[in-house]
Amino acid sequence: MSSSGQYSYSYIFKYIIIGDMGVGKSCLLHQFTEQKFMPDCPHTIGVEFGTRIIEVHGEKIKLQIWDTAGQERFRAVTRSYYRGAAGALMVYDITRRSTYNHLSSWLTDTKNLTNPNTVIFLIGNKMDLEGSRDVRYDEAKKFAEENDLIFVEASAMTGENVEQAFLETAKKIYQNIKDGKLNANMTESGVQHKERGGPASLGDSSSSDKPNCSC
Amino acid sequence: MKTADEQSLSHCFKQVMVSLGHLLDVISKNTLEMLPGNGTIVLDTVCNVHSLVTSHDLNCQSSIVHSTLNQVFQSVANLIKFCDDYFLYNNNDEVNEELAKECVAQVEQAVINLVSLVDQNSHSSLVKSMNNLIGGKFRSSLPEIPRIHTEVDTSVSDSSETMENSFCLNKSWESITMSNPPSKPPLDRNYSEYPPPLPPKKKSLNVESDHKAYSLEQLSVSSQGEYDFNSLQDYSTHHDTIDGTHSPQLLTHSSQYISYSSSVSSSSQHVISNSQHRINVNQVSNLFETNSVSSSSAISGTAMMLESAEVFQSVANLIKFCDDYFLYNNNDEVNEELAKECVAQVEQAVINLVSLVDQNSHSSLVKKHLYQDAFLTTFRTFKTPLEIIKKLIDRYHKFVSSSEVQKQRAARETFSFLVQVVSELTVYELDDNLVKYLTDFIYQLLSSGHFKPARGLRVKLLAKYDCKNNESVKNEILSSLNVYTTHYTLLAFKSEHIAEQMTLLDSDLFIKIEIPEVLAWIEQQNEEKSPNLTRFTEHFNKVSYWARTRILEQNEARDREKYVVKFIKIMKHLRKMNNFNSYLGLLSALDSAPIRRLEWQKHITEGLKEYCALIDSTSSFRAYRQALAETQPPCIPYIGLVLQDLTFVHIGNPHLLPCNELPPHVQYKNVINFSKRRQQFNIVQNMKRFRSGVHKFPRHDRIIEFFSNFDDFLSEEAMWQMSETIKPRGKPKH
């Protein structure tokens, strides 16, 4: 059933991207999905912006990335986006220390609102702006280790390490599934499994098979 | 005729004196908040006198006339400056009464001199009445300030409006037609000698009135509620007809068509008796020549071709008829029916052609306005309002001194755009620096006798300033209104009424959000620069946390359930009222982790699913966007999504674009990426659209009090604790 070329995949992983305003969350997503935001055609407004199919250990996985950029202040709503995320990309800006200092509160939110197995990936964005660096690499590295986070510095501008951050997260989630830590059939796990060649499982999102509108 | 003139001049003069007296009264009675309004009245009344006096044949070269006029301009400029300076900067100081008297006296004298310019012989009665006025010291006849204020206000504006109106319209149309006078149909005179035998004459009249309607429409297109001032109509009319691209050409051409079309019809009737059909043919072909000029500018090809083809066909028929008769049937009686038929066809075809041109120039106007709207909405993303205003004023100065018609037009266009920029300023953009810049400019305008534009700009500025003052007063009132007595519970009120009152509160906050602060938020996220947006967002969060708290504070499961059901009912009504904002606020409450994790009856969880579907985020909120697109105002959208869309546009599109096509002398390497601004404009346009509607529900004070500003809510941690007290956290899931 789900054998139609590039749109077939065996898993859907849900990600969220969080962090202070202006750290470049949407830029990272923009870079990773290589999709033009808001093309001129008004019909494409209904397109899911943050999706891309990747491959991990030979399995096709659709990443569904929820970017709340712009909506940060609507706390009452954005909190609900955390639920059922298998991966959380927590972003700060290496040229603005304040965005680094807020990480602990972002982390608390993430731990409170996601399930215990959610993979949290820390990204120090804007590594291309070495000249105005405000947060040292080893400092952030240490913070990441203490809190059991995977860490990388990246640049949404040049694309450096962006791919890696998204892929590493997926690998870790996949590993959790294989290890039995994450049950792909639980609704809150942030993961949906699709049997290859068989009928789609119940948890399958109805919209997940729709090809992206190309305007 | 002259006596009527005299009467109105005497009347206007009286009004100047009354308004000046009143101004002094205001100062002596220390009701200074009225000062700017009084300034406006003085300006209006002087303006009326000035218009009337200059409508007499004054010798403008004469040095006396020149210096008298200058005296008027200068004294009025000083007086207005006095009023505005005091109002805008020195609110707390004592007013300099001596200076005020000095200014008033100067205006008085200048106006007296001005009126005296009108032929001495013809206005002895006027001078008498003037003397009476001055002798009688008009001030003593003012019993009470506020009443007089409004009285004077309305009477002046009533009489002056109609006058100014006719003035402005005449003037603008005059100048449009004068710049390119439509050639008069050569056969016009004959026309009256030949009574129109055909109904088509009416049709051609219709075209004319259509044309007028069109030009009025133009005015309304341009005004869009922005130009409530007659003085500006003058400008906007020019502005639109000249409007950059091709419209001036089109307009003069289409007025030519009308004369052509009437000449075609008159001459075609002529044909029947005189067989002078050659003239006729020439005229129709003229029509085509002019037409082809404009068609290249704006008109869609096919429609034009079709209409043109009909003109060709009908003209061919008519010519054939004439020639047939001439060549073959010289002695027979003419078939009048057939002739009428042919003439009618030509007329109809020409009328169609003309109206096509009208439509198209209209739609290009609309396009032009869209561009202007987009610019006005988004220019802050590349220039500050002060920078734009400075540039516009510089541009105005550059062109206004020129005698070239084209440059004069550019100056007017620039000015009318400046007024638009000012009228769309947000209150927090109106800082001292900007106000100073504008009042200086108004002073310059007045000193050089440009009363009407100065008045228009000044009234806009003062209105903005009033808004700013009201704003701060209102906010104080709101914050002091926090006295409440909570005897009621949510269940005591009807769901529909609660939804109505929530919507009223939302609506108040929503219409205050100004578009520029929304755009500024995307780039700067500065609460001070986006105060109303911040307030709205906070309100949204508060409503949601308030609702969560109301549910969790119930001790009994049954009561919690009652509350959830109540909120669902309220949501149903919110949806009916198109209040997507609070709808989502409540939904996010019911769907929040501390509440969701509790056990609910199936009918509740199932019911909730339906409500979630509207706001489902898949396909970038397709369901919600669809619903919104089908919604008519009044409506309160969810602003978070507007912000998200704007963020995506901001990130996905560069600020500047490299430009290779500019001429070499232009120094910029990059140009502003206007297509990005257009996208931004399209997004905020929806907000603008919904701001236009207002929810009209009666205010229900008990419910508003019960809300108590939604301040009564628990912290997220506390709510988690309550939730876990109700249902202890299970073992972590594997």
Image (cartoon, rainbow, N blue to C red):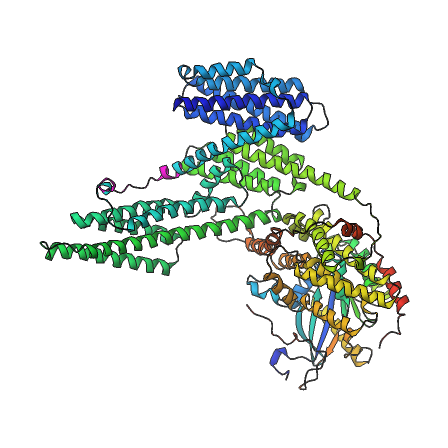
Relative horizontal placement of residue A158, taking residue B284 as reference (left or right): right
Relative horizontal placement of residue B630, taking residue B488 as reference (left or right): left
A14 is higher (above) or lower (below) than B669: below
Residue A127 visible, this angle:
no
Relative horizontal placement of residue B728, taking residue A92 as reference (left or right): right
Quadrant where the C terminus of chain B sits is bottom right
Q: Which residues are magenta?
A: B175-190
Give whichever of A102, B439 is nearer the camera.
B439
Q: Position of residue B273 (x, y in %)?
A: 17, 48
Residue B715 visible, this angle:
yes
Q: Position of residue B667 (x, y in %)?
A: 53, 46
Q: Residue at x 48, y 21 (%)?
A: B10
Is residue B176 magenta-colored? yes
Q: Position of residue B543 (x, y in %)?
A: 77, 56
Q: Residue at x 82, y 45 (%)?
A: B483
Find residue A82 and report its image quarter: bottom right
Find residue B255 and report its image quarter: top left
B277 is higher (above) or lower (below) than B577: above
Give whichever of B250, B264 is nearer the camera.
B264
Q: Position of residue B668 (x, y in %)?
A: 54, 47
Relative horizontal placement of residue A177, taking residue B237 as reference (left or right): right
Quadrant where the N terminus of chain B sits is top left
